[in-house]
Every structure is written in structure tokens, then in C-alpha cells.
Amino acid sequence: MNFEVVITCAVTGAGDTVGKHPALPVTPEQIAAAAIDAARAGAAIVHCHVRDPETGKGARDVALYRETVDRIRSADTDVVINLTAGMGGDLIIGPDDAPTKFGEDTDLVGAMDRLPHVEELLPEICSLDCGSLNFDDGSLVYVSTPGMLRRGANRIRELGVKPELEIFDTGNLSFALQMLKEDLLDPPPLFQLCHGIPWGAPADVGVLKSSVDQLPPDANWTAFALGRYQMAFAAQAVILGGNVRVGLEDNLYLEKGVFASNAQLVERARNIIELMGAHILGPEETRAKFGLVRRG
């Protein structure tokens, strides 16, 4: 069991959830305010996407990231900033008779074009999605090839940013471990074990434990699962020696029929963790534990 737990709050994500929650953060002001509230509730790390303020869809606009990060850094509440670097991997395969006629929502760019906001803003952490994945039941494929990952990992290390290795399935973990063997990642590595994303690793504790058993001894890791499994996985992660992620990116509800805020989800997770006898780490303790370079 982990008795010194880091809570990450994933504030908004990029999924089609704007119409499903009445107060999902969309604008930089809203995202930053939600991140600060989550930090005050006990999150040591905030994981941030940005969205187009007009459409609510996920975006890669550096100006939106800049405003969001500036607002968080100028607040009177310290928190570790973790920016997604996963945007730009969406490939919508065309119909069977024309599969290369990619859908209009395709947003596919190379490894370097997924990092301009990271290069400018230098967050302490950015995500690195460690493999491609069939996503949902349609024709969306998330693309993150070995070549892209090696180039991305190398550039992130040059920037002095800690990559959070996003593991959506067992092959993703195998490749992340391969990057460690190739000395593309500085110690201690930081893993995030992601469960319940269609069609990735299921929200099953046996699958979680199998992944945990393969991690290097010096690894720091966090686990989460989507929807109704969010709090159950928070407890399981602590029991297995890991850290916790909650937030509206992964789950919109505090309980059935009751919409949550990010701060409320952090408070719920914190209560569970503390009732288990563990201590919540703050941002400075988290920086020391994860080997982060403080920014801003």
C-alpha cells in the first residue's frame, strides 16, 4: 500500500462531454479556475487540456494553453502543471470503399507538432500516449507510432519536462519499457495506467495488478478508470502502491444523477485515501518524489 499519495485532477479532457455536463470547464478562465479549486481541495497535480471556446471541442491552440497556464501560475495556490501532449493523433478512417478518404474531424500531426505549447510553456509534466488505439465503436484511431514516440520522448527530455507515460493497453506498457531500455527516459519514470477507455485496458483490478507487477522498482505511477469506476480505482491504486487521478475528464458524476465539480471529486478521493490511513502529498513533496523541475 502507498501511504504517501499524490492526487492528480484531470480538469476537462477533450472528449465530447460539453453537452453532457452543465458546467464543464471550456474557456481558459474556466479551466484555470477549476484547476485552482482542485488544488485547494487537495490535488497536487492538475492535468490540463484546452478547448475551443466557441465549439467546446478539444484544441491545440498555443494561445489557449498560454492563457490557461498563466492564470494557474499567477494564482496564490501552488500546483504542479501537467499538460496533455496527446492532441493531434486523431485519424478518422473513411468508408470501406475509400478508407483513405479521412473524415473531416481528422487531426493528425507528427510528434513535434504535438509539442509547441510544451516547448513554450515548459510545464513540469506533459503526457506521452504510448501507443495507437482503436477508440470507441466508430472509425476513430488514435495514432501514436513507435517512431513518433521516440522522437517525442527525446524532445521532451531535451526540454527538461517529465513525460507521463500514458498506458492504455498492455502493448503500450511494453513499448514504454522499451523506451526505458533505450535510455529515452530519465529516472524515475512516471507511468499512468489508464483503464476503461474503449478499446483499451478494461476497468479490472486483475489487469491493473498485472501492469503494476511489470513496472520498474523506481517507477512512480498513477491509475484511473472511467465513469462509475473512478473512486473504486482510486482505492485500488492506493492499495497496490500507486497514486490517484480523478476529475471531469474521466467522470462527470459525484453519484448517480448528481453532477460533480473537479474539486468535489478531489475531495471525495481525498476522503477515501485518508480513511485508508494514507497521507496526501502537496505540490512540493510531489516534485521531490517525482523528480520534477519547478516552473513558473
Image (cartoon, grey):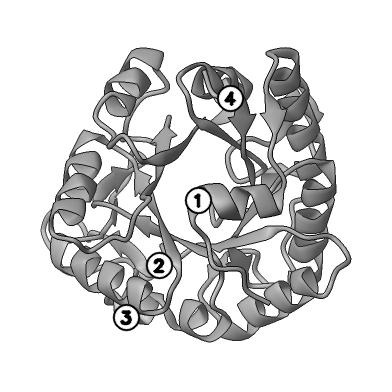
* Amino acid type shown at disc 2: Asp
Q: CA distance from mark 1 to mark 4?
A: 19 Å
* Mark 1 or 4, closer to the camera: 1
* Mark 2 neighbour density, 10 Å: few (under 14) some (14–19) many (20 or more): few
- The residue under the point 78% across, 60% down is 78
* Amino acid type shown at disc 1: Phe
* Mark 2 or 1, closer to the camera: 1
Q: CA distance from mark 2 to mark 1?
A: 36 Å
Q: Which residue is mark 4?
A: 234
Indicate the position of residue 259 as horizontal and vertical percent values: 79, 33
* Mark 3 or 2, closer to the camera: 3
Q: CA distance from mark 3 to mark 4?
A: 33 Å
Indicate the position of residue 290 as horizontal and vertical percent values: 50, 50
Q: Which residue is mark 3?
A: 112
Which comes before the other along the chain, label 1 or label 4? 4
* Amino acid type shown at disc 4: Ala
Which comes before the other along the chain, label 2 or label 4? 2
* Amino acid type shown at disc 3: Met
**Vertical placement of 166 versus 149: above or below?**
above
Which comes before the other along the chain, label 2 or label 1? 2
Write down the quadrant of residue 252 in the picture.
top right
Question: If the image is split into quadrants, where does the C terminus sit?
Answer: bottom right
Q: Which residue is mark 2?
A: 105
Q: Which residue is mark 1?
A: 290
Indicate the position of residue 274 as horizontal and vertical percent values: 74, 21
Q: CA distance from mark 2 to mark 4?
A: 33 Å
